[in-house]
Image: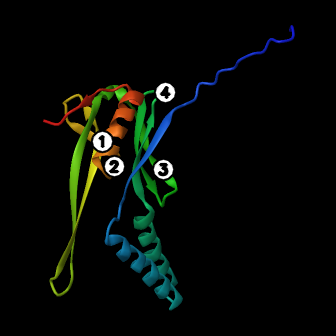
Amino acid sequence: MPPGYFFLTFHIKKMVVNNKLEYILSGAKVFVGYLFIFTGAIIAFLGQIMFGLSVSTLALFFITTFSGVEIDTTNKKIKQYNKLFGIIKTGRWQSLDFFIGLTLIPVRKINTIASRANITNSVVQKDYRIYLVNKNCKPAFPIKICKNMEQAQNSIDELSIWMKLPVYSRK
């Protein structure tokens, strides 16, 4: 090969977007989960090893398990998954051809806890969720959760470009 020539190699990168959505336990319930881990450890230390480890393992499962969405924009596939113990990913891939677009929906979530004295404490959380829209023009499942409207608008625009899907407004 003559000097001065060189080969350019192009690598097609696989574009995969991974969005962690929600933990099974959120808000004040996480405190109860940690309390059960601590209680299970004390029970195991006091001699009931199997029962204590079972309680701690179950609480650890609820604290660390979360749901998410993985989007393969190169192959036009999506996978809604649960990650058990934060390690084992379950779910199956489906084609993006089953969906006609994206939509943005504001969600208001209220967590209420009541004490034994019947005193309630409520926490209101507002977030914005980007959903895939199915062929019936209904939101199928969330693919991203954003804390504010500006972040949600930017995210839905990016996802629309990457996934080559239009954005639908809510009616």
Query: Which element type, helix, strand or loop, lies under badge 4?
Result: loop
Q: CA distance from mark 2 to mark 3?
A: 23 Å
Dot label at residue 74: 4
The amino acid type, in three-letter code, at marker 2 is Cys
- Whether residue 169 is visible here, answered yes or no, is yes
From the image, state whether disc 2 or disc 3 is nearer to you.
2
Residue 27 placement (x, y as % from top left): 32, 68
> What's under tag 1, amino acid-wise?
Ile
Residue that extends furthest to the bottom in the rendered view of this protein:
46
* Residue found at the very far top of the displayed protein: 2
Residue at coordinates 25% horizontally, 34% vertically from top-left?
133
- In the rendered image, which residue does mark 3 sit on? 89
**Residue 35 position in % (x across, y down):** 40, 80
Quarter of the rendering containing residue 91: top left
Q: Earlier in the sequence, mark 2 or mark 1?
A: 1
Secondary element under disc 2, as helix, strand or loop, is: strand
Q: Is residue 84 left or right of residue 124?
A: right
Q: Nearer the viewer, residue 83 or 120?
A: 120
Q: Say if 29 sits above or below 117 in the image.
A: above
Location of residue 132 with respect to 39 vertically, above or below: above
